[in-house]
């Protein structure tokens, strides 16, 4: 494996912070594969696979899917990747997931290059999520089962309890950068790009 070309970026941040939006753009610009665990799970739900049927009520309730399911999904996606050029959107989300990812990346010889924490005030986050649900409904498009105010608030709470502690995990690696996630999408992207372009 050509270690120099490996690049592993992790997006952290609460629901609605813009992880998916920004990860998509960055992946296209840097030739990285975006792995969004939320998208993967929603795809299973839409196709009504056995996994989809198992996780649908968990997503609708705004709770986290069990760690072993997520770790197996991620392992499958990245274990044959060479070089490892990836952006994680929505993974890891618990300490157990972060530990499993550390081990997996160590096996692959591909350490985390950058962890980006997108920060947006709580009420703006709820507004973005509710607005996404409203717009999808108005356009006759599928509405995410978790894009209601009630579930969005529960997702925020789950984030605070389960995922926010990972900020410290990545701070310890010296790879974490906090990025202001407010303003236009272009403004946020410019801030993120500055971080990524200087990451080793
Ligand atoms: P997931 O799909 O990962 O959802 P999330 O993290 O809760 O967040 P969102 O997708 O709502 O927000 P985002 O930060 O990606 O922002 P986005 O770019 O979409 O997870 C869903 C569920 O799957 C979880 O609750 C859980 O059940 C399960 N799951 C997933 N991963 C798991 C894991 N690892 N372990 C266990 N369970 C897991 O933007 C949001 C909206 O804001 C959009 O409409 C966008 O257009 C808008 N927007 C973005 N940027 C801006 C801006 N600068 N200004 C104004 N609007 C903006």
Image: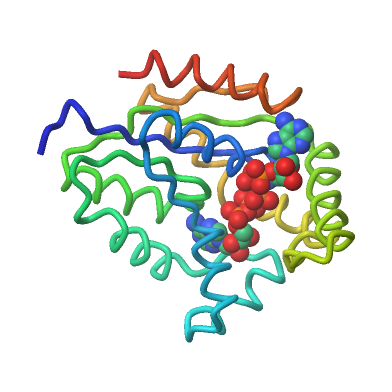
Instruction: Check the image and report above or below for 109 versus 76.
Output: above
Residue 23 pos. (x, y %): 52, 38
Q: Quadrant of residue 134?
A: bottom right
Q: Position of residue 130 (x, y in %)?
A: 85, 52
98 or 105: nearer the viewer: 105
Quadrant occupied by the C terminus: top left
Residue at left offset 54%, top offset 69%? 43
Q: Is residue 161 visible?
A: no
The residue lying furthest to the left in this view is 1
Q: Quarter of the image holding residue 117?
A: top right
Q: Judge from the rendering whether residue 3 lies leftward or rightward of residue 184; answer left or right.
A: left
| In the image: residue 16, left or right of residue 91 | right
Q: Quadrant of residue 164?
A: top right
Q: Position of residue 32 (x, y in %)?
A: 37, 38
Marks counted in the figure total 0
Residue 116 position in % (x across, y down): 51, 29
Q: Is residue 80 left or right of residue 127?
A: left
Give the residue displayed 26% in from the left and 34% down from the top. Answer: 111
> In the rendered image, is residue 3 in sight?
yes
Residue drawn at x 44%, y 65% as measured from the top left: 67
Q: Quadrant of the N terminus?
A: top left
Q: 182 above or below 54?
A: above
Camera-side residue of 21 and 16: 21
* 62 in relation to 108, above or below: below
Residue at (31, 58) in percent of width and height: 77
| Residue sitting at the far front | 139
- Colour option used: rainbow
């Amino acid at each position: 494996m050509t270690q120099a070309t490996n690049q592993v970026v992790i997006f952290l941040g609460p629901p609605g912070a813009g992880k998916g939006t920004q990860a998509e753009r960055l992946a296209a610009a840097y030739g990285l594969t975006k792995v969004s665990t939320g998208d993967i799970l929603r795809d299973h739900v839409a196709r009504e696979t056995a996994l989809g049927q198992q996780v649908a009520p968990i997503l609708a309730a705004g709770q986290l899917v069990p760690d072993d399911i997520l770790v197996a999904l991620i392992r499958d996606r990245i274990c044959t990747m060479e070089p490892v050029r990836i952006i994680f959107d929505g993974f890891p989300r618990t300490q157990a997931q972060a530990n499993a990812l550390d081990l997996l990346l160590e096996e692959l010889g591909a350490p985390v290059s950058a962890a980006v924490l997108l920060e947006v005030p709580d009420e703006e986050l709820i507004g973005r999520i509710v607005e996404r649900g409203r717009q999808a409904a108005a356009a006759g498009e599928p509405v995410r089962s978790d894009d209601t105010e009630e579930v969005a608030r529960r997702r925020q709470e789950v984030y605070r309890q389960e995922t926010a502690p990972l900020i410290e995990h990545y701070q310890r690696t010296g790879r974490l950068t906090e990025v202001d996630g407010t303003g236009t999408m272009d403004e946020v992207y410019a801030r993120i790009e500055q971080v990524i372009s200087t990451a080793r």
